[in-house]
Amino acid sequence: MNSQRPETAAASAPANGWAIQLEKINKRFGAVHANKDIDLRVARGSIHGIVGENGAGKSTLMSILYGFYTADSGTIRVNGTEQEITDSRHALALGIGMVHQHFMLVDNFSVLENVVLGAEDSGFIKPSLDRARQELNRLETEYDLEVDPDAIIEDISVGQQQRVEILKALYRGAETLILDEPTGVLTPREADDLFRVLETLRAQGKTVILITHKLREIMAITDSVSVMRQGEMVATLKTADTSPEEIAELMVGRHVLLEVEKGPAKPGEKLLEVHNLVVKDDMGVTRVKNVSFSVRAGEIVGIAGVSGNGQSDLLEAVSGMRDQSAGDIILKGVTLSLAGDDGASRARAAGLAHVPEDRQRMGLVTQFAEWENAILGYQNSPEYGTNGFLDIKAAKKRAAEHVELFDVRPANINLKTSLFSGGNQQKIVLAREMERDPDVLVVGQPTRGVDIGAIEFIHNQIIKMRDEGKAILLVSVELDEIRSLADRILVMFDGQIVGEADPATATEGELGLMMAGIGNDKKAAE
């Protein structure tokens, strides 16, 4: 297949006309040409997907449409009329709303107060709230977006909070909605509910632009999809006329395996055991509640769950980054003492490697060069010098080996890590931890914010470690990733393991119910 397939969809004006037309949009940030002569047309009353690797330019393009950035050149037409969008208020006045990946809500305000905030129609708040309540009731009914207007934001589910964000945009008169990675924090059931809402919006004549890296969602909900690569628009296709494989190839420029290829696990002895673990956060709130499980040599145990249900605290405790309040962590039959500031160092010394969930906050010092990050946490190893003296030559040699083995780009070990893309930053962390030949690998969100091509590589490396007899504990909010990689799945809800599932037989619906706290009450197999 030709990965430079030309634009085929939307060549002629649709019956309802164009909601959005972007023509020859250019945007530079210094030497980086983020958008290069971009053309995009979105039919009114349609759901239009935009996909591309990290750095492809899709977020920049949508930020121009929503008024966060101003294009260096090019033309924007909204409903056929040329516009110069100066800021987000101007975009909203033109009927363009945006639902961000990280919600912009005030946690201790009610739903109604959040919807009205910034859009009050008088200096007196009560009349504004009364009128808003009536309008909110109408919008909820018309678009199947029911939510209690008096509920406090921090007391409602993530899916309900997302509905509030959509209601905010509709309340402000949005006719075109931009959604940025909208299912990243949702359970499968909540994602299905969102899709039903989007279908209702489309049926009512609204236009939706969906930015997502999940090709399954593109195929399930969109009418057309635009593919961007390296700042350019590669193709715009009718979704019914394409496939996930074709879209992936257009995104990356080469053939990509979308499914993990792996043989059956061959579990051996227990290498990691967790018994009755209790973990509290910095505020003293118990986040992990009496959790027990084990991971054997030659298997991957995946922990699934909606973000915020204790998985992060569990990983931090097992890796020595957070003290446990009770319970035992046992590595190769030896109970580890991980309390104190050097707990992570003692875990590494015992044979446990950790790829943290947040690579920039916990995995890297982004102002350090690549070669410095390549030895971070292992700088006292004898191979890098003795008696407090660092052998820079040896450290750089090891870093260069990592760069070549993990295809880190650019291949410049002296470059600041902040200047690498998210996917390449992740490769730097993975190379550092995996190449220490640990007995146990604890990895959180291995492909968060990572390109399709890099995802394929990272998954293959994790499977390779499993097949070499390592024990791998994997946490991911991506249910597809958990189902593809894990040999056993444990589901966490509210700090507890509420069920165990076989990824070969468990359906997405069954896992989704457990993730919502409706477990199968099956104890984790040890």
Image: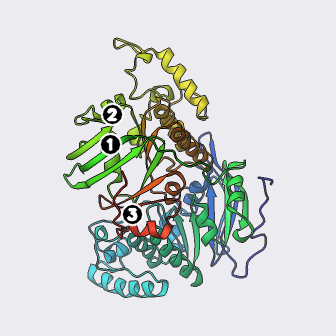
Which residue matches tag 1?
318
Res. 347 mark = 2
Looking at the image, is mark 3 or mark 1 nearer the viewer?
Answer: 1
Q: Is residue 124 visible?
A: no
Residue 497 image point, x, y percent? 33, 59
Packing grade of label 3 (10 A; few <14, some 14-19, many >=20) is few
| Residue 21 versus residue 386 in the image, above or below | below
Assess whether mark 1 and mark 2 are in contact (beta carbons under 8 angstroms).
yes
Q: Earlier in the sequence, mark 2 or mark 1?
A: 1
First along the sequence among labels 2 and 3: 3
Which quadrant holds the N terminus? bottom right
When asked about the image quadrant of residue 243, the answer is bottom right
**Which element carries disc 3, helix, strand or loop?**
loop
Q: Which residue position is annotated with label 3?
A: 104
Please state which amino acid type lies under the numbered disc 2.
Ala
Label 2 to label 1, Cα distance in Å?
Answer: 8 Å
Q: Give amino acid for label 3.
A: Met
On the image, the x and y values in percent for residue 32 come to: 62, 42
Asked whether the residues under the numbered discs 3 and 1 touch, taking CB atoms below 8 Å apart as contact, a structural biologist would say no
Q: Quadrant of residue 94?
A: bottom right
Q: Residue 198 location in percent, x, y?
A: 54, 76
Q: Is residue 206 visible?
A: yes
